[in-house]
Amino acid sequence: MDEQEMAVAPGNDAAPPDLVAFVDSSAIVAMVDANDNTHGAAVSAYAELLQQGYKLFTTNHVIAETVDLLDAGVGPDVARRWLRDHRLSIYHADEQDERRARALVISSRNPRGLSYVDAVSLVVMEKFGVADAFAVDPHFLNETA
Amino acid sequence: MENEQTLLSVGDAARRLERSTEQVRRYLREGRLKGQRIGGQWFIERATLDHFASATRSPQTFVQRLGKASAVHPLNDVIGIGKGAGSNIGEGKLAYRLAAARRRA
């Protein structure tokens, strides 16, 4: 994936007045793992988001997924250090968000399926009118496009 | 034991609503929040407050409260803190997990 693809993926036109981007676990892993193929591009995209004045946030589900991915990919010490040192704002999905996410997963026609974490992310993005996602997972980017 | 009929003071209501006590008194005076005066002090039923809170909570509030990333630097301290085995999360999270599992096997 090149830097052009890595840059913030535009979503629908219902952008809120503030520039806000949702942070997916794939972007976090890319930022944390210096040896991942996407590391350089992710760091550049992050710098661009800061420079453009974006607000960034994620969900409690993405936090859990990130710890899991980092644990598998770069080990539990790095996963714990990330958990301790990141300063991302976290939105805690409520019962209604989860009900909608469950319905999305169940009704997904995507042959790859839709993960529950991604479904919660999509529901939360829609809820807040957030059209931009900081992500490198092509499947997540496709869902938000 | 707190239940729906539990009466909350203005201070308790302010904490739950994340508003000032003066703001809560204003809601009560204006009738936007229903309360009762006992011995000259306002009290609010917990169920009434919960309903008021959910009715007034804008879905944008969370996003509006966020600080700009350029001020918070939410991921600056974690850039490159791990050195994996040359993975590619750009292929997707599932592929990333599978590759990690294969390396461990």
Image (tube, rainbow, N blue to C red):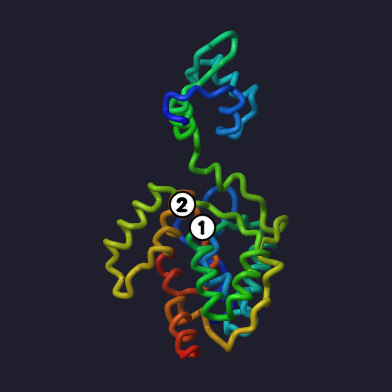
Q: Are marks 2 and 1 in contact (CB under 8 Å)?
A: yes
x and y percentages locating residue B62 in the rendered image: 55, 46
Residue B23 lies, with reference to residue A127, above or below; the image says above
Task: Please tell me which residue lies in front, A118 or B103.
Answer: B103
Q: Chain of mark 2?
A: A
Mark 1 neighbour class, 10 Å CA radius: few under 14, some 14 to 19, many 20 or more? some
The answer to whether B105 appears left or right of A32 in the picture is left
Residue A123 falls left or right of residue B62 = left
| Residue displayed at 44% across by 57% down | A12
Rendered location of residue A121, percent (x, y): 45, 59
Crowd rating for badge 2 (residues with CA inside 10 Å; few <14, some 14–19, many 20+) = some
Q: Residue at x 58, y 88 (%)?
A: B85
Give the quarter of the figure containing the C terminus of chain A: bottom left
Residue A137 at what x, y percent from top left?
48, 74
Q: Quadrant of residue A75?
A: bottom right
Which residue in the protein does label 1 denote? Answer: A60
Residue type of the residue flagged with mark 1: Asn
**B103 versus A77 height, above or below:** below
Q: Earlier in the sequence, mark 2 or mark 1?
A: 1
Q: To which residue does mark 2 refer?
A: A93
Is residue A132 positioned above or below B67 on the image? below
- Front-lying residue, B92 or A138: B92
Give how far across and how far down residue A7 sits, in percent. Answer: 57, 70
Q: Residue at x 72, y 55 (%)?
A: B71
Q: Image point 62% across, 85% down: which residue?
A: A35
Q: Secondary structure beneath disc 2? A: loop
Q: Secondary structure at mark 1?
A: helix
Q: CA distance from mark 2 to mark 1?
A: 7 Å
Q: Amino acid at mark 2?
A: Ala
Identify whether A30 is placed above or below A95: below
